[in-house]
Image (cartoon, helix red, strand yellow):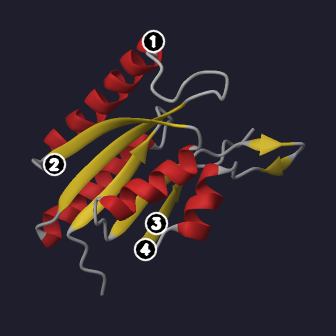
């Protein structure tokens, strides 16, 4: 059975954030582990990587405050960080490696493109490249 000591949770402001942070906190609490939540700001190629993106940082702070609130409900400590990168998926994998994470819990909003379910680019990249276990928490499909 998986015994994660460091659980990495990328957040992005989607409806799945609360569920993924909650799931990570539950697992960490059972295993006496730690939760590490990260928001990655995707920096456009026409800007320097260390550009001052005040609006995006403000939004990231708010999203990470939400993650801290969810962790507090579980009485679980959480470490948060904002990163800036060209590619969000690559930044998630690199940070999970650098932080020594045992598990990545990532949310996947339910969306369609051209009538078909679309997983986007970030989650498939993480699934292909993460050296640790990855749990994907897909948002419920809206029934019309």
- Which residue corresponds to mark 2? 74
Which of the numbered marks, if any, corresponds to residue 135? 3
Circle 3 crowding by C-alpha within 10 Å: few under 14, some 14–19, many from 20:
some
Where residue 106 appears, x then y in whole percent? 46, 54
Q: Are circles 1 and 4 on residues that touch, CB within 8 Å?
A: no
Q: Describe the element under mark 1 as helix, strand or loop.
A: helix
Question: How far apart are the alpha carbons under marks 1 and 4?
Answer: 33 Å
Q: Residue furthest top?
A: 55
Residue at 26 percent across and 28 percent down: it is 65
Q: Are there few (<14), some (14-19), or many (20+) residues within 10 Å of tag 1?
A: few
State the CA–CA distance, disc 3 to disc 4: 7 Å
Front tag of 3 and 1: 1
> In the image, which is nearer the foreground, mark 1 or mark 4?
1
Label 3 with label 4: CB-CB less than 8 Å: yes
Percent position (x, y) of residue 84? 45, 34
Choose between 135 and 46: the one closer to the eye.
Answer: 46
Determine which residue is flagged by label 4. Answer: 133
The label shown at residue 55 is 1
Q: Position of residue 91 (x, y in %)?
A: 48, 49
Of badges 3 and 2, nearer the viewer stands: 3
Q: Is residue 119 above or below residue 129?
A: above
């Amino acid at each position: 059975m998986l015994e994660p000591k460091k659980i990495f949770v990328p957040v992005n402001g989607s409806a799945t954030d609360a569920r993924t942070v909650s799931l990570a906190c539950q697992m960490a609490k059972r295993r006496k582990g730690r939760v590490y939540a990260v928001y990655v700001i995707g920096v456009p190629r026409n800007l320097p990587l260390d550009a001052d993106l005040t609006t995006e940082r403000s939004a990231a702070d708010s999203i990470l405050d939400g993650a801290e609130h969810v962790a507090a409900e579980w009485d679980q400590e959480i470490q948060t960080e904002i990163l800036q990168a060209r590619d969000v998926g690559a930044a998630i994998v690199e940070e999970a490696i650098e932080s020594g994470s045992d598990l990545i819990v990532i949310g996947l909003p339910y969306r369609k493109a051209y009538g078909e379910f679309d997983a986007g680019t970030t989650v498939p990249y993480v699934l292909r490249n993460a050296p640790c276990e990855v749990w994907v928490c897909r948002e419920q499909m809206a029934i019309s």
